[in-house]
Amino acid sequence: MTRGDHDFDEFADPASWEDEGFVLPPAKNPRAVVSVPFALDEVALLERAVNASGLRLTEFIRQAALSRAASNEATPEPIPVRRPA
């Protein structure tokens, strides 16, 4: 055990706490964050669409994904993206 590890051991012991603390209510609408990688040309395509829509990039992607998921298409068709040769 390193010296740094020992410094945090006291926080695991409730007897060392200064007060009882408090319990926060659960979030009313909890969210998850999903990381999605995009190629640079895909980001350029998204940015053009985002600029035209007036939305933030994250909101644009969120709305597009939820709209596609809510549609009756079980398997989305791949969208061709031109990549530099």
Image (cartoon, rainbow, N blue to C red):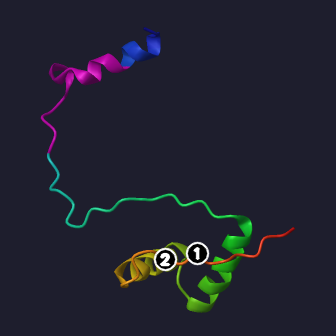
Closer-to-camera residue (63/67): 67
Left or right of residue 74, residue 12 in this image: left
Q: Which mark is residue 76?
A: 2
Magenta span = 8-22
**Helix or strand or loop: what does disc 2 sit on?**
loop
Q: The C terminus lies in which quarter of the figure?
A: bottom right
Above or below, 56 against 2 in this view is below
Rendering quarter of residue 77: bottom right
Closer-to-camera residue (13/17): 13
Above or below, 23 against 19 in this view is below
Q: Amino acid at mark 1?
A: Pro
Tell me the residue at 68%/79% (across/down).
45
Q: Position of residue 38 (x, y in %)?
A: 63, 64
Q: Are marks 2 and 1 in contact (CB under 8 Å)?
A: yes
Q: Which mark is residue 28?
A: none
Q: Position of residue 34 (x, y in %)?
A: 45, 59
Above or below, 24 against 12 in this view is below
Q: Amino acid at mark 2?
A: Pro
**Helix or strand or loop: what does disc 1 sit on?**
loop
Question: Of all residues shown, which one is farthest toward the top?
Answer: 1
Left or right of residue 83, residue 52 in this image: left
Q: Which mark is residue 78?
A: 1
Closer-to-camera residue (39/9): 39
Closer-to-camera residue (2/37): 37
